[in-house]
Amino acid sequence: MIDTSAFQGKKAAYFTLGCKLNFSETSTFGKMLQDLGVTTAQKGEKADICLINTCSVTEVADKKCRQAIHRLVRENPGAFVVVTGCYAQLEADEVAQIEGVSLVLGSNEKANLVQFLSDAWTGNPTPSLSPERGGEYKARFYRQKTKDIKSFAPSCSRGNRTRYFLKVQDGCDYFCTYCTIPYARGFSRNPTIASLVAQAEEAACEGGKEIVLTGVNIGDFGKTTGEKFIDLVKALDGVEAISRYRISSLEPDLATDELIEYCAKSRAFMPHFHIPLQSGSNTVLKLMHRHYDRELFADKIHKIKKLMPDAFIGVDVMVGCRGETPECFEETYDFLDGLDVTQLHVFPYSERPGTSALSIPYVVSEKDKKLRVKRLLELSDKKTQAFYERHIGQEAEVLFEKATRGRAMHGFTKNYIRVELQAKDADPALDNQLVKVKLGELTRDKESLKAII
């Protein structure tokens, strides 16, 4: 039983690393605590609760997590510090030994965050769950093994953003050789379509106009309920109060022709896709144990562009993984150079303990990784700017978001072109409003188009 009085008057600080799914979950945690009387600590205020939602996709991510934990402990002396997320699941004992950490929750346990906080403050043990203790840990940590991660924490929240992020799926069954996410998040699982439609309807009642579908491998939706992702898409398209939906990241082998064809003619699904490639070399894709080859990937891109010529297509690319010889990288570069995609999300391979990729003998030097990242980022900039420039002078409907401190007010077109308002046109009343504008020239940083109202 939750002791609500223990939460009254407390202030909380939140810090999130990693993917959109993490940001969505943190936003939901914040809303849960807010409903119990907890307010968000403002800049300069000391928090009573610190929640750090971690990522572990790379070694750099692990380092950033540790730095964030140390900083929040230092800035909020005496606070109750909770660490959750992928890094907390994979390295719970390591996190628990960081001075100042009070509680570490694995992927299965974070769904019961409020109960754990209540129990910790009142001194009552959580029924049927015992904290793991080893050596002289300074904090309790709760963590289940991968096969036992079965809980699903619903999340449909916007935090301080305009767009809502709806968690439709969690976990992954793919076990690519370089990746630890299945160990951190567990196997693929999902709620029902009916429950997700209800969350979308609730977001609409709160004034939401755009929802981004998030998850670890959202195209794999249905493992738990026997439903299909295309059926979810069709059901959400029927929530007419929501003007826009975006599909966050979709594996190429799960981007079915039926799904692409439906999105092309749907009422609210935007011409915007993010499809991970990882490598344009079939040799490397096999070493990674990916579920497709470059020919299938190219076929999906061509299908999208045929039906939605103005679609924005973002692509994840990993460089410098074990086995990626110079010849394999050149295959990737040439493949992407000839492909009609909009933007590349490029990141260097990072060795993760326990992954089977460590058995691949060919190792790429850090120097070569940096050079390869640089070349692909330059290619990405060229493609994105060319895509933006093709739309200059056109009219487009933009969903504006309130400006963050020091930034211009901006929004996105249907096909995800970032549009900025000049200072004289910026108006807080435009937040969460769909406005027709004329697309002007590139901004100085070349990351947006100027809006002409």
Image (cartoon, rainbow, N blue to C red):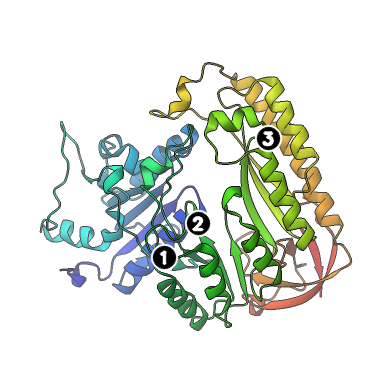
Q: Give, as a three-letter code, the residue at label 2.
A: Ile
Q: Quadrant of residue 441?
A: bottom right
Secondary structure beneath dot 3 equals: loop
Depth-wise, is mark 1 or mark 3 nearer the camera?
3
| Residue 211 horizontal/vertical position (percent) | 56, 69
Residue 66: where, in percent of width, then height?
39, 38
Circle 2 Cα neighbour tier, 10 Å, few/some/many (<14 / 14–19 / ≥20): many
Q: Is residue 410 visible?
A: no
Q: Nearer the viewer, mark 1 or mark 2?
A: 2
Q: Do residues under tags 1 and 2 come within 8 Å of each other at their CB atoms?
A: no
Nearest the eye: 129 or 173: 173
Label 2, on which residue?
A: 218
Q: Position of residue 266 (x, y in %)?
A: 66, 73
Name the residue carrying label 1: 155
Q: Contact, CB < 8 Å: mark 1 with mark 3?
A: no
Q: What's the amino acid at mark 3?
A: Gly
Up/down of 272 relative to 202, above or below: above
Neighbour tally class for label 1: few under 14, some 14-19, many 20 plus, Cα within 10 Å: many
N-terminal of the pair, mark 1 or mark 3, is 1
Q: Depth check: 437 or 354 in front?
A: 354
Real-space Cα separation, disc 1 to disc 2, in angstroms: 14 Å
Return the disc, 1 or 2, that comes first in the chain's sequence.
1
**What amino acid type is highlighted by mark number 1?**
Ser
Left or right: residue 228 compared with residue 89: right
Identified at 21% across, 62% down, the residue is 115
The mark found on residue 355 in the picture is none
Reading the image, the residue beneath label 3 is 280
